[in-house]
Amino acid sequence: MVKRHHNDIIGSENLIVDVRDNPGGNDSSYFEILPYIYSGPVKIPGNGFYLSPANKELFKTWFPEDSEQGKAVRTMPDYSIYSPQKGFIHELDTLYHSPRKVAILQNKETASSGETFVLRTKQSEKVIIYGVNSAGIVDGFNGHRAELGCINLRLPTTYRSYKLPEDAIDPYGIAPDVYMEAYMDDPYPFITQHLELMDD
């Protein structure tokens, strides 16, 4: 879809990317649109593997026994966090000057990979985040849902942010740059007008 609309996107002054009600999935699903959004290199925080006994058995099937990861998951104590990478820089070969401004619209249902998209793109000088706080389900990945009567829980099972508790996002979520709860039913006129005012 992005390739098909390439000329429309680079011919636009502004772009709105709506990730409301996006529960996540796989980070690679949004890589195609990043060259239109990034303004330069982006810092990606590290994540760790949560080494519960069940997870260690799972990871043994993922990592060869003689690999660094394989040795770690077989020798580290239960319930510890193995963080092979403390973070890295994501730098793209191609960046497009247009659109000049990118609005990212999020809501309280924007979660997991929906939130990693927001965390990456908000580092761009082109981006303004609109809406309300995101779900706050990004410090722990691969959540398992559990329904307990009137309460729905999502428990992180395998991945955990390396920078906890200092830089925690859960459970509060990512705050927008422009808070606009009153406009969430029909957000586009407000965002369009705000972007036009910023261009003046």
Image (cartoon, rainbow, N blue to C red):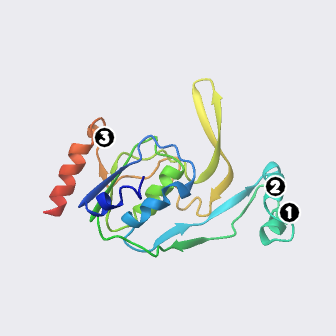
The numbered disc on residue 74 is 1
**Sequence-wise first label, 1 or 2:** 2
Secondary structure type for disc 1: helix
In the image, what residue type sits under mark 3? Glu
Residue that sits furthest to the left in the current view = 200
Quarter in which the C terminus is drawn: bottom left
The answer to whether 156 is drawn above or below residue 118 in the figure is: above
- Residue at 83 percent across and 58 percent down: it is 60
Q: Which residue corresponds to the image point at 57% horizontal and 24% vertical from the top-left? A: 150
Q: Find residue 181 and report its horizontal and vertical position in percent.
A: 31, 40
Q: Residues within 10 Å of mark 3 (few under 14, many from 20)?
A: few
Marker disc for residue 56? 2
Residue at the (52%, 43%) spot, across then down: 23
Dot 1 or dot 3, earlier in sequence: 1
Q: Nearer the viewer, residue 94 or 188?
A: 94
Whether the residues at callouts 1 and 2 have beta carbons within 8 Å, the answer is yes
Q: Which mark is residue 181?
A: 3
Within 10 Å of disc 1 (Cα), the crowding (few <14, some 14-19, many 20+) is some
Of the residues shown, which amino acid type is indicated by label 1? Answer: Arg
User: What is the crowding at mark 2: few (fewer than 14 residues within 10 Å), some, or many (at least 20)?
Assistant: many
Where on the picture, by quarter, is residue 97? bottom left
Q: Earlier in the sequence, mark 3 or mark 2?
A: 2
User: SS for tag 2?
Assistant: helix
Residue shown at 44% from the left, 52% from the top = 174
Question: Which residue ends up furthest to the top in the rendered image?
Answer: 149
Please provide percent x and percent y for residue 195. 21, 56
The span from disc 1 to disc 2 (Cα, nearest Å) is 7 Å
